[in-house]
Amino acid sequence: MKRVLLITSILLLSICFTYGQSNNIDLENLVKIGEIYSSNVNASGEELSESLESLRGPELDKLINTLIAVGSADENLLTKEFLSKPSFKELKYWYVLREIHYNNLSEDPEKRSSIQVAEQTLEEDLDSRWLLSNYYYRIRGGIAKLFNENDLRNYNIELDTYGLQSETEKAILFFEIVEALTGRFQVLQMMNNHDKVLEFADKLPSFNGKPYYEYTSFSFADFEWIGYEKIESYKERHLGDLYSSINSHFTALYTKEKDEDFRNLYFNSILFIPDYFKYSGSMENDLQVLYNQSRN
């Protein structure tokens, strides 16, 4: 009996030791990935891909595949493979990359080591909405690069098909993709390049089978969202950005005298929903005036 117990104990210790080694290797490689990412947040170049390949393992394969896809502006970034909600563990890994990068940017002489950042982030109880927002933010650069050279109008992003569990989560995905694609509208508007705004607008993917501006499901509860070294209202930040992009699109249509198109955009977008005006920043009063005039 004692011999059986001894053998069992040895086996258990062996399993625990092997498991611990595996975890340490994954953590070390995750930190290395974080350092590589921090030095090249666009994840671009063959050298980066080669560096990542050497760090593969069962726990980190999906993370590495996604980083490589982002760097190469892979068209599959707009498919379920990458738009589907990752597991909680994977979302934590992506947050580790974020925290390592921000820690590296810090000028604090007593800042933590990257391994400390990783360990603390993995142990920390983080808001699942922050985790999801961070993931889609990290991949949106690849989507923006894809859009630079490609017409995406044939893509339809069905928000119910990615394992997103609430209107909040669907909005998080929507905001990050739309900001990646339409953030340029505001720059083009300042340059009075309305033709280019409309050229890009015509190449946008649809959402649930409709133009991006017709997605208006933003009645979910607002929450505190943590950006770089500051906390702000999630809706003020992201609905505010959406208002700016739609307004640039609207202005371009109006300026180019696309009467039917600008009316359709106005009446079917958040430009015509007073409940959201408070999130539009400096546009709030103008939106209210325009809304009142349209009701007369």
Image (cartoon, helix red, strand yellow):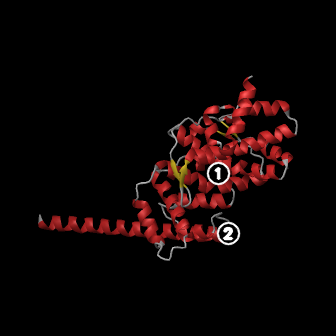
Asked if marks 1 and 2 touch (Cβ < 8 Å), the reply is: no
- Residue 115 position, x and y percent, is 45, 71
32 or 38: which is nearer to us?
38
Q: Earlier in the sequence, mark 1 or mark 2?
A: 2
- Residue 122 position, x and y percent, is 42, 60
Viewer can see residue 26: no
The residue shown at (72%, 41%) is: 246
For disc 2, the neighbor class at 10 Å (few under 14, some 14 to 19, many from 20) is few
Q: Is residue 54 left or right of residue 207?
A: left
- Residue 273 position, x and y percent, is 65, 32
Q: Which residue in the structure is indicated by mark 2? A: 46
Q: Which residue in the structure is indicated by mark 1? A: 77
217 or 107: which is nearer to us?
107
Describe the element under mark 1 as helix, strand or loop: helix
The residue shown at (46%, 67%) is: 117
Q: Residue furthest left?
A: 1
Q: Is residue 91 left or right of residue 71?
A: left
For disc 1, the neighbor class at 10 Å (few under 14, some 14 to 19, many from 20) is some
> Quadrant of the rendered structure where residue 285 is?
top right
